[in-house]
Image (cartoon, rainbow, N blue to C red):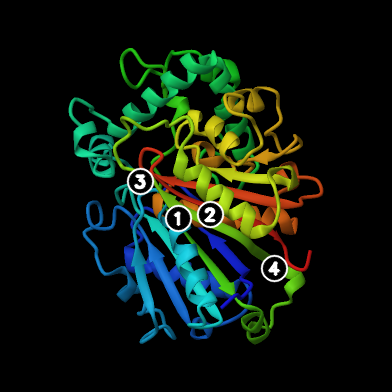
């Protein structure tokens, strides 16, 4: 059954710290606030999916679908929980889209969240590093204090040596994203400005993470709390919600693919699964990279800002970093990439990230982001959400409904 899927509503918390907000309240807020965006009650939802990654290890909470069912109006409905590492949020959106396309309902709800900090807002960096390390292959954890920064420091090193890129080039990614975050009211790093020179120099807070490798503090995404919720609907669903198609964005194309978890032995500079998922999304949408001028890519580390520009097709192989250096990824550039601030500036509450990437891109297409970040004449948007060491990939292409 081929049914067009629309994004009818999107909501998110400010990323950063949720303090003593408990998991049931986080989930309740994500669901009810998404519905409130279009003035409906949760009982209009036919199906739902929720995603998180640290719910067991950091929050000691399982069976998240049961917490969704506690939201008034959602009991006894088809609800599931998904986990796909840092691609969990994107996977939740695809799960809902699949159900709607199969005719299981006409209105769906996708929720993603993460509570990674203590109730006082502080973080246990060593504990978080250990927990996130579970999403790597056991053979690649030994000897690594912070597993994922170490793995991506290796990717960064390979990218630099292969393409002749410098640490200052990667600093263009983080400095642009910190600049974007200053205008995004939901961004964790709003109020903290970082120049390209500061991001390039290893001094003060900006220290090397792994001895002998180029990754520094400002190359890294944030440890964040946060939630996001999204209402998706078929054409019939929009009618029942009382939402006009002109006020929506169409999920025009999407793709998902997974590579082996072990990084060793794979060409991570040309991630096969990511390229396949993005290609599938473009093919489904009937467009090509040249049509896209809005994007959100998974910059867990600056090297992924560069590789992400290549995966979505805005830069040729090896030229992703230069795309940022040349200002082409700025909001007024060739393609506004991570105008939200990305994972580095906006924050990275893992389960919420993929939903927030798609939601922010929808806001861009609808002209709903702050003026300083708004891409002029937005046409099509692409998103690229990954999990693990460039292992799981969820990609989407969005367009204004009816165009």
Q: Residue 356 carries which label?
A: 2
**Viewer-side label of 1, 4:** 4
Above or below, 12 against 337 in this view is below
**Marks 2 and 1: in contact by CB < 8 Å?**
yes
Whole-angstrom CA distance, mark 1 to mark 3, is: 18 Å
Q: What is the x, y in percent for residue 268? A: 42, 32
Can the viewer see residue 346 in this picture?
no
**Marks 2 and 3: in contact by CB < 8 Å?**
no
SS category of the residue bearing label 4: loop
The residue depicted at 69 percent of the width and 68 percent of the height is: 248
Above or below, 390 against 63 in this view is above
N-term-proximal mark, 1 vs 3:
3
Location of residue 70 (image quadrant): bottom left
The residue depicted at 43 percent of the width and 20 percent of the height is: 158
Q: Residue 121 carries which label?
A: 3
Residues packed near mark 1 inside 10 Å, few (<14), some (14 to 19) or many (20 plus) = many
**Viewer-side label of 3, 2:** 2
Q: Which mark is residue 352?
A: 1
Location of residue 80 (image quadrant): bottom left
**Viewer-side label of 1, 3:** 1
Q: Which residue is under mark 4?
A: 248
The residue depicted at 45 percent of the width and 67 percent of the height is: 95
Q: What is the x, y in percent for residue 207? A: 39, 18
**Marks 4 and 2: in contact by CB < 8 Å?**
no
Image quarter where the N terminus lies is bottom right
N-term-proximal mark, 3 vs 4:
3
SS category of the residue bearing label 3: loop
Whole-angstrom CA distance, mark 3 to mark 4, is: 35 Å
SS category of the residue bearing label 2: helix
């Amino acid at each position: 059954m081929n049914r067009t899927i629309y994004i009818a509503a999107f909501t998110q918390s400010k990323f950063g710290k949720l303090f003593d907000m408990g998991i049931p309240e986080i989930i309740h807020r994500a669901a009810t606030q998404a519905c409130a965006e279009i003035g409906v009650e949760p009982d209009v939802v036919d199906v739902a999916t929720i995603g998180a990654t640290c719910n067991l290890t950091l929050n000691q909470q399982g069976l998240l679908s049961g917490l969704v069912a506690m939201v008034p109006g959602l009991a006894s409905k088809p609800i599931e929980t998904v986990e796909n590492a840092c691609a969990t949020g994107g996977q939740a959106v695809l799960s809902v889209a699949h159900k709607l396309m199969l005719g299981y309902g006409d209105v769906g709800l996708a929720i993603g969240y993460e509570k990674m900090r203590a109730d006082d807002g502080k973080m246990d960096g060593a504990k978080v590093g250990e927990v996130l390390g579970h999403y790597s292959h056991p053979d690649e954890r030994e000897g690594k204090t912070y597993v994922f920064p170490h793995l991506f420091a290796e990717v960064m090193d390979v990218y630099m040596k292969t393409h002749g890129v410098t640490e200052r080039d990667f600093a263009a990614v983080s400095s642009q994203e910190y600049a974007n975050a200053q205008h995004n009211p939901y961004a964790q790093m709003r109020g903290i400005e970082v120049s390209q020179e500061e991001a390039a120099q290893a001094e003060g807070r900006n220290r090397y993470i792994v001895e002998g490798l180029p990754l520094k503090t400002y190359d890294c995404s944030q440890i964040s709390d946060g939630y996001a919720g999204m209402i998706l609907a078929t054409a019939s669903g929009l009618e029942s919600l009382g939402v006009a198609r002109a006020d929506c964005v169409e999920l025009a194309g999407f793709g998902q693919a997974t590579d082996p978890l072990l990084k060793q032995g794979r060409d991570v500079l040309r991630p096969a699964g990511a390229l396949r998922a993005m290609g599938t999304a473009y093919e489904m949408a009937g467009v090509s990279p040249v049509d896209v001028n809005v994007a959100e890519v998974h910059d867990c580390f600056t090297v992924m800002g560069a590789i992400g520009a290549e995966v979505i097709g805005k830069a040729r192989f090896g030229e992703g970093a230069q795309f940022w250096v040349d200002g082409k990824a700025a909001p007024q550039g060739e393609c506004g990439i991570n105008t939200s601030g990305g994972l580095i500036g906006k924050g990275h509450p893992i389960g919420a990230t993929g939903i927030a990437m798609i939601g922010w891109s929808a806001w861009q297409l609808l002209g709903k982001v702050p003026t300083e970040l708004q891409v002029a004449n937005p046409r099509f948007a692409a998103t690229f959400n990954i999990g693990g060491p460039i292992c799981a990939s969820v990609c989407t292409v969005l367009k204004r409904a009816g165009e």
